[in-house]
Amino acid sequence: MLTGRQEGGFQKVDADSGAVLREYDLKSELCRESVAGWELSPDGRLAVCYTDNLPVLDLETGKMLYETGALPWRVWASFSPDGRRLAVPGRDGFVRLWSLDMHSEVARLPVRGALVRFTADGHQLVVISPEGELRVLDGSPKAGAAR
């Protein structure tokens, strides 16, 4: 699991023993701006950092893999249950689906969202708008309009 540190940054901690497995300094190249939080992939290998451009971090190497450039606004992204996709709502009125294998956007859904979550089977995407409206969309990799 990930835990925040008061002085900035976060730690990857073993949930059973409480042992600190690795420390990350968010003032490094990983996340250059202030960080509102992060989302951890189901396998614990990746995290998306809630800061400008939403960087995807490899927690094993401590390196930034790429930035989604999703123009977030205090939104909450979601990894698919299989850890292969990332759904990111943006302040431009689109929810983007990213392939983590290809490091690229694979779909852009025209819906305003502040919070997104994949269903347990990964086939649907629950989207809550900034106004509190709930929508359920196709969350498959082929969903959405072409970029």
Image (cartoon, helix red, strand yellow):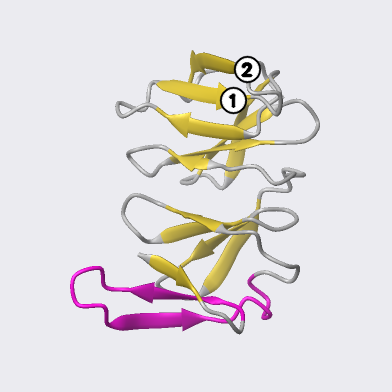
Circle 2 — which element?
Answer: loop
Q: In the figure, 55 relative to 146: above or below?
A: below
Residue at 77% in and 44% down: 71
Separation of marks 1 and 2 at Cα, in angstroms: 5 Å
Residue 128 occupies which quadrant of the picture? top right
Q: Which residue is mark 1?
A: 128
Main secondary structure along the magenta-highlighted residues: loop
Tell me where the magenta segment starts and ends, as one range: 8-30
**Dot 1 amino acid type:** Ile
Q: Is 19 part of what is drawn in magenta?
A: yes
Residue at 34% in and 82% down: 20
Q: In the figure, 21 relative to 79: above or below?
A: below
Residue at 48% in and 23% down: 125
Circle 1 — which element?
Answer: strand
The foreground one among 13 and 7 is 7
Q: Is 23 part of what is drawn in magenta?
A: yes
| Furthest residue in direction right, as rendered | 92
How busy is the neighbourhood of tag 2: few (under 14 within 10 Å), some, or many (20 plus)? few
**Dot 2 amino acid type:** Glu
Quadrant into which the C terminus falls: top right
* Whole-percent x, y for residue 64 in the image: 59, 67
* Whole-percent x, y for residue 56 in the image: 57, 57
The foreground one among 19 and 24 is 19
Residue 32 occupies which quadrant of the picture? bottom right
How busy is the neighbourhood of tag 1: few (under 14 within 10 Å), some, or many (20 plus)? many
Residue 93 occupies which quadrant of the picture? top right
For the residues bearing labels 1 and 2, Cβ distance under 8 angstroms: yes
Quadrant into which the N terminus falls: bottom left
Numbered mark located on residue 11 in the image: none
Numbered mark located on residue 133 in the image: 2
